[in-house]
Amino acid sequence: MVKDKMFRFLWKNNKDKTKRTSMYQDLSTGGLRMVDIELTIKSLRRAWIKRLLFRDNCNWKVVPGYFFFNKHGGLNFLLRCNYDVKYLRHIPTFYRDILIALDEIKTLYNYDQGTDTILFNNKEILVNGKPLFMREWFIKGIHMIQ
């Protein structure tokens, strides 16, 4: 939406005269060094993962901690799971968008768990059409199956 408005402004509400991807290029290669707003938003969302995982003793972390821990075992655990964002409907949109942005790049890193499979938040292990999370089992350390 913002991207379309930027290009409509640039071309004075006419059809694009060059490919949008070339407009993001440097001046030396014929571009205008325009900001790819979608890419910028995705990278800002991905930067939040580091903030959520590594900054300790921050009062603001209580809110995301509540949403991620109560039903998913915490963000650190959820990120190791084979989750699907479509099953995380109760999480606020901001945090869902962060996970969606991260999902787009997590396929680049093939994390091999060996023969162990994380039982919870797994999109391939469904009960009544939803991923399983049993807090009692999680607290007792039962996380994986072989």
Image (cartoon, helix red, strand yellow):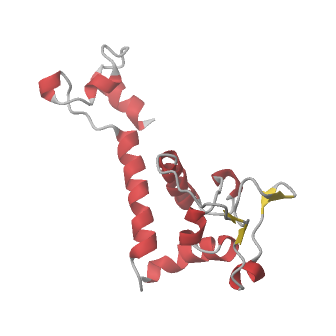
Describe residue 116's horizontal placement relative to residue 19 as left or right. right
Q: Is residue 5 above or below residue 82?
A: above
Q: Position of residue 45 (x, y in %)?
A: 43, 55
Q: Is residue 92 above or below residue 63?
A: above
Q: Residue at x 62, y 71 (%)?
A: 67
Instruction: Give residue 79's quadrant in the image.
Output: bottom right
Q: Position of residue 111 (x, y in %)?
A: 53, 56
Describe residue 52's horizontal placement relative to residue 79 as left or right. left
Q: Residue at x 40, y 66 (%)?
A: 50
Name the quarter where the C terminus is drawn: bottom right
Instruction: Give residue 24's quadrant in the image.
Output: top left
Q: Is residue 122 above or below residue 65?
A: above
Q: Residue furthest front?
A: 115
In this view of the protein, which residue sits in the foreground, 85 or 118? 118
Q: How many marks?
A: 0
Q: Residue furthest right?
A: 128
Describe residue 122's horizontal placement relative to residue 79 as left or right. right
Instruction: Give residue 114's quadrant in the image.
Output: bottom right
In this view of the protein, which residue sits in the foreground, 67 or 139? 139
Q: Residue at x 33, y 19 (%)?
A: 19
Q: Position of residue 144 (x, y in %)?
A: 70, 70
Q: Position of residue 118 (x, y in %)?
A: 68, 65
Q: Residue at x 17, y 21 (%)?
A: 30
